[in-house]
Image (spheres, helix red, strand yellow):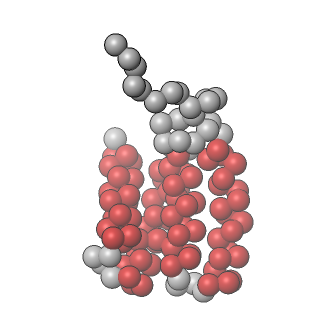
């Protein structure tokens, strides 16, 4: 019988598609990018929400949900204000906030 499974990706790749160490390298870059994003796009912008989300996801990938949660909550609040509570991106962030709360309660 033929094996139709996709070949394993080259190198050491996690289930989320990232290589080990990628989040560790990303956090300082996202921290640096946040004030630049605020300066370019304003304190309350979708670009800032995206930057907060990326930083939160990087912290979450490191297992630091304590640092990730307030960032994701702020990104969620921005999207609620700018896009509305029922916009797809807002609802997606709501799910991510709930996931972080769940991980912190374990």
Pinpoint residue 11: horizontal percent, then vertical percent: 64, 29
What is the quadrant of the C terminus in the image?
Answer: top left
Pinpoint residue 80: horizontal percent, then vertical percent: 36, 79
- Is 57 on the left or on the right of 88, as rendered? right
Q: Residue at x 40, y 19 (%)?
A: 3
- Tally of marks: 0
When the figure is inspected, residue 73 is found, relative to residue 45, above or below; the finding is above
Pinpoint residue 13: horizontal percent, then vertical percent: 57, 34
Q: Residue furthest front?
A: 1
The answer to whether any part of residue 61 appears in the image is: yes
Q: Residue at x 51, y 55 (%)?
A: 57
When the figure is inspected, residue 7 is found, relative to residue 98, above or below; the finding is above
Q: Residue at x 44, y 78 (%)?
A: 78
The answer to whether any part of residue 101 appears in the image is: no
Q: Residue furthest left?
A: 86
Give the quadrant of residue 96: bottom left
Residue toward you, 68 or 26: 26
- Is 23 on the left or on the right of 29, as rendered? left
Q: Residue at x 49, y 42 (%)?
A: 16
Residue toward you, 53 or 70: 53
When the figure is inspected, residue 9 is found, relative to residue 85, above or below; the finding is above
When the figure is inspected, residue 38 is found, relative to residue 65, above or below; the finding is below
Residue toward you, 44 or 65: 44
What is the quadrant of the N terminus in the image?
Answer: top left
Pinpoint residue 49: horizontal percent, then vertical percent: 51, 73
- Is 43 on the left or on the right of 95, as rendered? right
């Amino acid at each position: 019988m033929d094996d139709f499974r996709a070949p394993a990706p080259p190198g050491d790749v996690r289930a989320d598609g990232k290589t080990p160490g990628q989040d560790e390298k990303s956090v300082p870059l996202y921290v640096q990018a946040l004030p630049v994003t605020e300066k370019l796009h304003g304190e309350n912008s979708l670009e800032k929400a995206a930057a907060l989300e990326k930083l939160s996801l990087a912290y979450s990938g490191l297992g630091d949900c304590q640092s990730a949660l307030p960032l994701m909550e702020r990104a969620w609040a921005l999207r609620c204000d700018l896009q509305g509570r029922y916009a797809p991106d807002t609802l997606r962030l709501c799910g991510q906030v709930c996931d972080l709360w769940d991980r912190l309660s374990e």
